[in-house]
Amino acid sequence: MATVKTTLDIHDELLMRAKRHAQSTGRPLRAVVEEGLRHVLSAPPPASYELPDLRVGDPQGADPLERYSWPELRELIYGGDGP
């Protein structure tokens, strides 16, 4: 497999920790970085975020907004100023 040189911006403290880890394990920094990338890329993706259900009222009940026309709803939401 071919290698490609690239430039990365890494927080100073993280880079220092990676260099210390590489030195303590006797491996080049490149190997430590590659191992970290392989680890992250092999992990399953995080679960998608689902919004909590914050509805109020009876879900089987009548829609309380049904009795309003769009101009009336807009007036209730925005007051007399409108968007």
Image: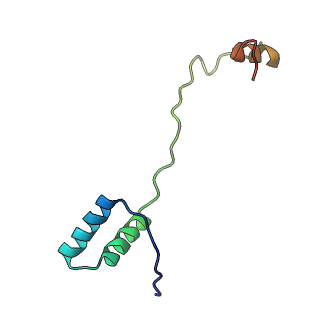
- Residue drawn at the location 46% of the way across and 80% of the way down: 5
Point 53% across, 30% down: residue: 53
- In the image, 79 versus 53, the foreground residue is 79
Q: Is residue 83 left or right of residue 35?
A: right
| Residue located farthest toward the left when viewing the structure as drawn | 24
Where's residue 66, x and y in %?
A: 75, 17
Residue 11 sits above or below residue 75 on the image: below
**Res 9 quadrant in image:** bottom left
Q: Is residue 82 above or below residue 40?
A: above
Report x, y in % for residue 63: 70, 17
Q: Residue at x 18, y 73 (%)?
A: 24
Of residues 11 and 40, the one drawn nearer to the viewer in this rendering: 11
Q: Quadrant of the C terminus?
A: top right
Q: Residue furthest bottom?
A: 1
| Image-quadrant location for residue 68 | top right
Examine the rendering and report whether any part of residue 44 can be seen: yes
**What is the tally of numbered marks visible in this picture?**
0
Position of 46 with respect to 28 (left or right) is right
- Residue 66 can be seen in this image: no
Q: Position of residue 20 (x, y in %)?
A: 22, 69
Report the coloring of the rendering: rainbow
Q: Is residue 17 left or right of residue 3?
A: left
Q: Residue at x 37, y 74 (%)?
A: 34
Residue 65: x and y, percent? Answer: 72, 16
